[in-house]
Image: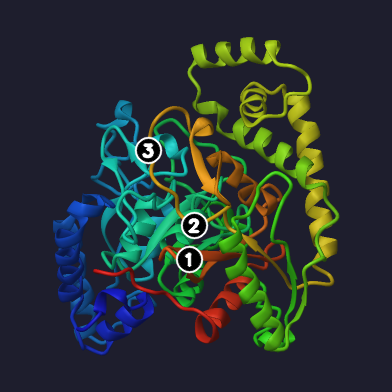
Amino acid sequence: MTEFHFKSALEISSAIKNKEISAVEALRYFVARMEKHNPRLNAIIQTNLETAEAEALQADTAIASGENLGPLHGVPMTVKESFNVKGLPTTWGDPAFKNNIAEENALAVERFQSAGAIIFGKTNVPLMLADLQSFNAIYGTTHNPWKIGVTPGGSSGGAASALASGMTGLEVGSDIGSSIRCPAHFCGVYGHKPTYGVLPPRGHSLPGTHAFTDISVIGPLSRSASDLEVAFKALAGPETTEAIAWTFNAPQPRVRKIKDLRVAFVSSSPTCETDGEYGELLQNLIDWLGRKGAHVDDRARPDLDMVNVHQTYVTMLRAATSARQPAELIEKNLREVSELEQDDNSYYATMARGNVIRHKDWLSLNNERIRMRSVWQEFFKNWDVLLCPVASAAAFEQNEKGPRWERPMIVNGKEVPQTDQLFWAGYNGLPGLPGTSAPIGLTRSGLPVGVQIVAPFLEDLTGIELAKMLEREYQSFQAPPGY
């Protein structure tokens, strides 16, 4: 049982199938971990332990009868608060939805259960999933297990904190602005933002919402790259109604050996400065890949204007989330946009314009987005993956005062807006490409950082396969001290 809480989901499932531990014992083990560490971290904010115990007992009964429930048989796991779990509230951190009790499970929850997992709780998020930190008026603030007072990221911050501290076996989050990738990077775990549309998000919504949000995806977080692959395959595929006509068969990884890799590397952007210490750790990885025989180039990149990419992304991001705005906020944004200088391309100005963009203008941006995807497709004819930062730096000190675009973080010794980091969210997120966050080491102050592996459209398993190679040969999950 030593360090059982830091085993991968596949290892936990294997132990249950081999009768080294029962599913009920595994569940109680993680619940005990939660009771010990969660008061300090506030990562898991809801539980359904009675239901979970009954499901774990069923998993043990299946083992006794020789039945295999799937690759995650008996694995205790939690899900991001924004997913519906029958009988639990889905609030997105908004007090207006405090009494919104889910009547059925999200499709992702159903698919994890079909793979054998036991859902025993939900993890914290920021208000409306719209922050690089995870705090709200209902559940309070979630902390990073590597250092209290430092953010675990957002919006899947509770998920990453619970994984890194060994309170859960697996997680599922969502990502429109690096909400899977950044928390994984900040907490030293793995996260995969899939190709847009591959993992159906039904049930990841508030009441009355039926359309899926542009750019936004759902995807797994884990302590192992192999778990990412299993979870991705469990979640992938069409909705029930769409399955009448089509299926999804993910392309196999392009390569399985580092020496066969063609790797492009982008370390900085004109709109998002990379912290020097983080840059050194990224460069160490690139140098190692070169020594291992990979063909690496730090000048190769898609033929795209990075400033234009960022402006287009932020505008379309805020257009995608504008449906959440009350009427009075729309009127406020319309007034402010009318008063903006034409050449004001600050984050706030771009956000305001995106919030009230005309449909004709949105169609023009969407056309540009599809052009960008074509440029990426051409680029990936010569390169298997592109490696880049996940964010500007390692996790920053929590700051809950004022609007997020006015909150600073320290990069290279000076204050910069936290929202600058959104560049690395949109670089591949805007055209819908997959991005995998994998840990690569610790800063001198002892905080984890990761690399973002960008793979071709629909070729998610290529990015995950490189994460698996790095896990075996370069850097695997490290447990934070004291857990």
Q: Is residue 208 above or below residue 42?
A: above
Residue 462: tell me if it is visible: no
Q: Is residue 464 above or below residue 197?
A: below
Kind of residue at disc 3: Trp
Q: Secondary structure at mark 3?
A: loop
Answer few, some or many: residues within 10 Å of disc 2's Cα (few below 14, many 20 plus, some between 14 and 19): many
Which of these two is toward me, 297 or 4?
Answer: 297
Q: Residue at x 66, y 78 (%)?
A: 253
> Which quadrant of the structure image shows residue 312?
top right
Label 1 – label 3 distance at C-alpha: 32 Å
**Mark 1 or mark 3: which comes first in sequence?**
3
Q: Position of residue 189 (x, y in %)?
A: 43, 66
Q: Which residue is mark 3?
A: 92
Q: Is residue 255 visible?
A: yes
For marks 1 and 2 on the same chain, the one whose residue lies earlier in the sequence: 2
Q: Amino acid at mark 1?
A: Thr
**Front: mark 1 or 3:** 1
Q: Badge 3: few (under 14), some or many (20 or more) residues near its Cα, within 10 Å?
A: many
Please give the label number shown on residue 394. 2
Question: Mark 1 — residue?
Answer: 443
Q: Quadrant of the N terminus?
A: bottom left
Asked if disc 1 and disc 2 are in contact, CB closer than 8 Å, the reply is yes
Amino acid bearing label 2: Ala
Residue 11 appears left or right of 56: right
Pinpoint residue 386: horizontal percent, then vertical percent. Answer: 71, 66
Which residue: 16% across, 73% down?
A: 24
Disc number placed over residue 482 in the picture, else none: none
Sequence-wise first label, 2 or 3? 3
Q: Locate the C terminus by quadrant.
A: bottom left
Position of 181 with respect to 350 (left or right) is left
What residue do we see at 34% from left, 40% from top?
Answer: 135
Q: Residues within 10 Å of mark 1 (few under 14, many from 20)?
A: some
